[in-house]
Amino acid sequence: MPRYVGRENVRKRLEPLAGCPGRTTYEGASVRIETPAETLVVAPAFGLRQEGSYDRVELGPLLEALDRDHVVGAVLVRLGGYAVGVFDGERLVASKVGSRFVKGRHKKGGSSSGRFRRRREEQARALIEAAAETVAEVLEPNRDRIEHVALGGDRAAATRVAEQLPWLAGKTLPRFFTVADPRQRELERLPYDLYAAELSEEPR
């Protein structure tokens, strides 16, 4: 099964294979490395510019892609809080977090459940609006520099916020980052996951 591995750990895993007999195929957003002992497929977090194949283990283009830093906007949202940041490489250069109370789900029936649901929807809408305002405040000044946008937290909530700023759509990463509690510390921990590569290993 594929797993996400930090880019430094991927480098350590692969470097001993450089130049060894085998076959390396760069295609799409990933590279397939076949050796007499195993087959590995690596997909760097921000894609690959290389296409082609080699009759050996050729790691140069892959390692360059793993090492390359990017300017990334992060939007982490759950019903209860949000955290927005801009990363230049692994350095957090701008950020803002906030919270809004949103009631939990109602477990009882009857007329009270309808009032509860409407109140909860109002609170959720207020949080989405506040989060969207914060995203605009933090990301818009860096809009021309931001190459990618990472969404995380709760998928439905983060998507609703991102929809308020249509320019994010063309830059949103395919991977969704699950975060239990969007706070400053979660932003500060995010670079490891942002740059983690998808790695699958199969013995031959």
Image (cartoon, rainbow, N blue to C red):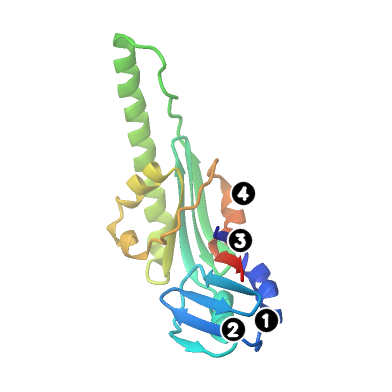
Q: Nearer the viewer, residue 204 or 159?
A: 204
The CA span between labels 2 and 4 is 34 Å
Q: Nearer the viewer, residue 77 or 44?
A: 44
The CA span between labels 4 and 3 is 13 Å
Q: Position of residue 55 (x, y in %)?
A: 55, 90
- Tag 2's secondary structure? loop
- Tag 3's secondary structure? helix
- Residue bearing the label numbered 4: 185
Residue 18: quadrant of the picture: bottom right
Q: Nearer the viewer, residue 38 or 102?
A: 38
The CA span between labels 4 and 1 is 36 Å
Q: Residues within 10 Å of mark 2 (few under 14, many from 20)?
A: some
- Tag 1's secondary structure? helix
* Mark 2 / mark 4, whichever is N-terminal: 2
Residue at the limit of the structure toward the front, as seen here: 204
Location of residue 200 with respect to 103 vertically, above or below: below
* Mark 1 / mark 3, whichever is N-terminal: 1
Q: Are marks 1 and 2 in contact (CB under 8 Å)?
A: yes
* Mark 2 / mark 3, whichever is N-terminal: 2
- Residue bearing the label numbered 1: 17
**Could you tell me the amino acid type at mark 2?**
Leu
Looking at the image, is mark 1 or mark 3 nearer the viewer? 1
- Residue bearing the label numbered 2: 59
Q: Position of residue 12 (x, y in %)?
A: 70, 73
Q: Are marks 4 and 1 in contact (CB under 8 Å)?
A: no
* Mark 4 / mark 1, whichever is N-terminal: 1
Q: Is residue 117 left or right of residue 52?
A: left
Q: Are marks 1 and 3 in contact (CB under 8 Å)?
A: no
Residue shown at 28% from the left, 57% from the top: 166
